[in-house]
């Protein structure tokens, strides 16, 4: 049904900050996203993002390229879209669990999620909504339902995921365009090491 290719790279944090991170530009574009200010994993934050990066010495980046076969891509768009997002969700959960294991192996490390937090569910139902939606203070991250498990993503900290994929993995991100699904998706996550 689909193939998985795992790619990885480790980059010194100073080099990654210099070449792949633009906090001002990317956090500004986060304002266009429906998750902005509505999830604890997303900006605006109550901490200095640059100082957060600088607490670590390197970033280990994992790219999971998920390619769908031709037969699958001939299904109706809506059916295919649902299948793809179910697969992406499943693969993201697997990566998350693997990263928690890596965190235990590397003292002081913190993982970076593939996209925004979905630990409470898809957000379609009231019970699945992030608690930040109903929290009056934007600085009370302890109100997160899974405070110990929630992780930021590379992009939510100003990282350029597109450039990361093209320069480090040699693949360009593809997007859904005009009801046409891409031939592959790439889940990008990582581990910040001390
Ligand atoms: S775990 Fe739930 S409450 Fe916490 S950031 Fe994720 S969606 Fe929001």
Image: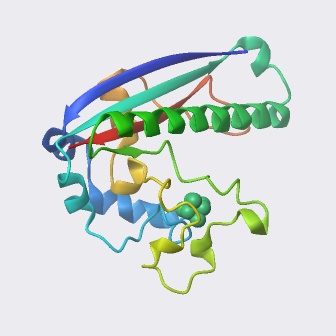
x, y percentage for residue 68? 67, 19
Question: In this view of the protein, which residue sits in the foreground, 160 or 137?
Answer: 137
Q: What residue is rendered at 38% in x and 65% in y?
A: 28
| Quarter the N terminus occupies | top right
Left or right: residue 108 compared with residue 124: left
Left or right: residue 25 compared with residue 156: left
Q: What residue is rendered at 79% in x and 13% in y?
A: 71
Image quarter of residue 162:
top left
Is the residue 37 above or below the residue 158 in the image? below
Residue occupying the far bottom of the picture: 136
x, y percentage for residue 114? 49, 42
Tell me how the rendering is colored. Answer: rainbow
Q: What residue is rendered at 40% in x and 45% in y?
A: 112
Q: What residue is rendered at 42% in x and 23% in y?
A: 171
Is the residue 70 above or below the residue 111 in the image? above
Left or right: residue 145 compared with residue 18: right
Instruction: Work out whether residue 34 can be spotted.
Output: no
x, y percentage for residue 31? 47, 67
Is the residue 103 above or below the residue 69 in the image? below
Instruction: Work out whether residue 141 can be spotted.
Output: yes
Image quarter of residue 46:
bottom left
| Quarter the C terminus occupies | top left
Count of number-bearing discs: 0
x, y percentage for residue 78? 83, 37
Question: In this view of the protein, which residue sits in the foreground, 184 or 150?
Answer: 150
In the image, ligand 1 is in what quadrant? bottom right
């Amino acid at each position: 049904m689909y193939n998985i290719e795992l790619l990885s790279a480790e980059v010194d944090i100073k080099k990654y900050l210099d070449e792949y991170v633009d906090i001002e530009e990317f956090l500004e574009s986060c304002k266009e996203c429906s998750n902005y200010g509505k999830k604890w994993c997303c900006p605006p934050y109550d901490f200095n993002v640059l100082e957060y990066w600088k607490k670590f010495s390197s970033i280990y980046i994992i790219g999971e390229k998920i390619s769908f076969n031709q037969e699958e891509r001939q299904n109706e768009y809506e059916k295919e879209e649902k299948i793809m997002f179910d697969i992406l969700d499943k693969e993201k959960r697997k990566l998350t669990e693997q990263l928690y294991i890596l965190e235990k192996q590397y003292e002081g490390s913190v993982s970076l999620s593939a996209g925004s937090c979905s630990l409470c569910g898809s957000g379609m139902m009231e019970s699945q909504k992030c608690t930040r939606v109903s929290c009056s203070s934007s600085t009370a991250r302890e109100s997160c339902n899974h405070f110990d498990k929630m992780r930021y993503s590379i992009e939510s900290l100003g990282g350029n995921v597109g450039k990361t994929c093209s320069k480090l993995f040699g693949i360009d991100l593809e997007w859904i365009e005009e009801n046409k699904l891409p031939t592959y998706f790439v889940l990008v996550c990582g581990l910040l090491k001390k």
